[in-house]
C-alpha cells in the first residue's frame, strides 16, 4: 500500500511539473492580465497594450539574438553592450557627422556584425567557452562606447569637448522608426513582429534552422554528419550582433538620443525572455515564439506593477524571480525526463 501511495505521489508531482513546463508561461500570462485588469481600469485598454508592445519590442529583438546563440549551445552576454554601442554610433552619425539615413542604419548594423565576428573568433578559433568569451567582449565593447562618446550621451546640438556645438540633429525620418505608427500599431511593434516571424520561419522551417538545433543538441554528432560546426556557430553570433544593433537603433529612435549604457539594464530582461520561452507549450528548446511570449510576460508584469505604483527599484526582484521560476521548472522537468529515460 505504501509503495503504491508513494508511486501515486511521484506520478502526481511529475504530471504537475509537466503541466507547469508546458502551460506555465501562458497560464502566468493569463493570470497576470486578469489580476491587473481587476485592480485597475487603466490596464486592459488598447492604448496600454500598445504601450506594452512598444516597450517589449526592443527587449524582444535583443532576446532573439540570444535565442540564436542558445540554439547552437552558446550564450551571448555581450548583447547589452553591443546594443549600447549601436545606440551611440547611430546618434553620433546624425548629430556629429550629419550622415544620410541609409548610413545611420547600415553602419551600426555593421558594428554589430563585427562584434559577432569577434565573439566567434574567441569561441571558435581561440577556444574560450561561450560564457567567458562574451563576458570579456561585454566589457571590451562597454569600454569602446564610453571611450567613443567620452562618457557623454549624444543629443541634438550638444556641446562638444572642443567648445563647439554639434552641427546635426536626430532626423525626423529616423525618429519615426521608434515613435511612429502604422495601421494603429507603433512602428517598432511591426519591426518586432516581422523579426519574430522571420526568426520563427528560419529556425523551424529551414535547413539552416535544423542545422543550428543539431549543432546545439550534439556538436560532435553534427560534425560527423558533415556539418561545419565552426561556421554554424559563427553565423549564430553574427546574427546575435545584428539583432543587438537593431535593438540599439530602435532605442535611439524611440528616445531621440544616444544614451550610454542603454543596453545594460535590458540584457538580463532579454536573457530572461529567452529562457522563459523554453517552456512555452513545452517546446523545450530556444525558439522565437517562446522568446516573444517570455518578453510579453515580463513586460505585462512590469507594466501592471508600474500602474500599481511599485517602486522602480524593486523591478529587478520581479525579473529575477520570473527567471528563477522559469529555470527551475525547465531543469526539474529535464531531470525528471532523464530519470524516466
Image (cartoon, rainbow, N blue to C red):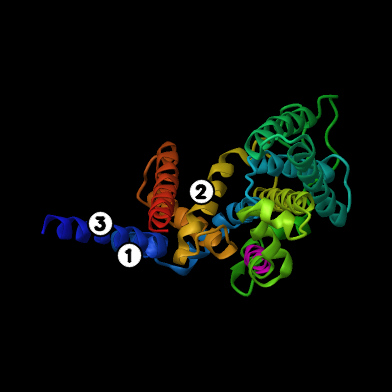
Q: Nearer the viewer, residue 318 or 156?
A: 318
Location of residue 327 in the rendering, given as x and y in whole percent from the top left corner: 44, 48
The answer for how far apart the CA atoms under marks 1 and 2 are is 22 Å
Image depth: mark 1 or mark 3 in front: 3
Q: What residue range appears in magenta?
A: 191-199
Q: Nearer the viewer, residue 324 or 251?
A: 324
**Residue 42 in view:** no
Magenta region, main secondary structure: helix
**Which residue position holds label 3?**
10
Compared to residue 133, the image places residue 15 above or below, namely below
**Residue 57 in view:** yes
Q: Are marks 1 and 2 in contact (CB under 8 Å)?
A: no
Q: Left of 9 or right of it: where is 187?
A: right
Location of residue 113 in the rendering, given as x and y in whole percent from the top left corner: 80, 48
Residue 195 covered by magenta stretch: yes
The answer for how far apart the CA atoms under marks 3 and 2 are is 29 Å
Dot 2: within a 10 Å radius of its alpha carbon, few (fewer than 14), some, or many (20 or more) residues? many
Amino acid at each position: 500500500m505504501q509503495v503504491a501511495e508513494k508511486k501515486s505521489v511521484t506520478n502526481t508531482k511529475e504530471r504537475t511539473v509537466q503541466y507547469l513546463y508546458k502551460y506555465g508561461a501562458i497560464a502566468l500570462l493569463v493570470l497576470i492580465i486578469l489580476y491587473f485588469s481587476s485592480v485597475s481600469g487603466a490596464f486592459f485598454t488598447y492604448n496600454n497594450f500598445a504601450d506594452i508592445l512598444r516597450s517589449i519590442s526592443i527587449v524582444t529583438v535583443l532576446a532573439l539574438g540570444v535565442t540564436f546563440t542558445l540554439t547552437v549551445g552558446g550564450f551571448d552576454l555581450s548583447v547589452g553592450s553591443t546594443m549600447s554601442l549601436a545606440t551611440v554610433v547611430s546618434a553620433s552619425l546624425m548629430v556629429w557627422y550629419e550622415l544620410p539615413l541609409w548610413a545611420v542604419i547600415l553602419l551600426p548594423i555593421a558594428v554589430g556584425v563585427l562584434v559577432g565576428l569577434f565573439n566567434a573568433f574567441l569561441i571558435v578559433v581561440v577556444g574560450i567557452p561561450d560564457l567567458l568569451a562574451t563576458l570579456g567582449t561585454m566589457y571590451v565593447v562597454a569600454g569602446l562606447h564610453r571611450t567613443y562618446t567620452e562618457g557623454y550621451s549624444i543629443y541634438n546640438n550638444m556641446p562638444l569637448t572642443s567648445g563647439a556645438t554639434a552641427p546635426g540633429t536626430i532626423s525626423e525620418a529616423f525618429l519615426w522608426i521608434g515613435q511612429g505608427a502604422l495601421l494603429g500599431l507603433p512602428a517598432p511593434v511591426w519591426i518586432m513582429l516581422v523579426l519574430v516571424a522571420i526568426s520563427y520561419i528560419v529556425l523551424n522551417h529551414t535547413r539552416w534552422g535544423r542545422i543550428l538545433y543539431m549543432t546545439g543538441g550534439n556538436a560532435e554528432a553534427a560534425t560527423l554528419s558533415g556539418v561545419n560546426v565552426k561556421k554554424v556557430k559563427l553565423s549564430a553570433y553574427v546574427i546575435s550582433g545584428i539583432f543587438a544593433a537593431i535593438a540599439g537603433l530602435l532605442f535611439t529612435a524611440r528616445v531621440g538620443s544616444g544614451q550610454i549604457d542603454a543596453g545594460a539594464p535590458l540584457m538580463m530582461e532579454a536573457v530572461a525572455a529567452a529562457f522563459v520561452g523554453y517552456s512555452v507549450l513545452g517546446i523545450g528548446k530556444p525558439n522565437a515564439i517562446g522568446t516573444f511570449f517570455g518578453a510579453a510576460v515580463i513586460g505585462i508584469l512590469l507594466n501592471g506593477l508600474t500602474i500599481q505604483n511599485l517602486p522602480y527599484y524593486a523591478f529587478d526582484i520581479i525579473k529575477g524571480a520570473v527567471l528563477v521560476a522559469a529555470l527551475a521548472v525547465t531543469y526539474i522537468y529535464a531531470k525528471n525526463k532523464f530519470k524516466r529515460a
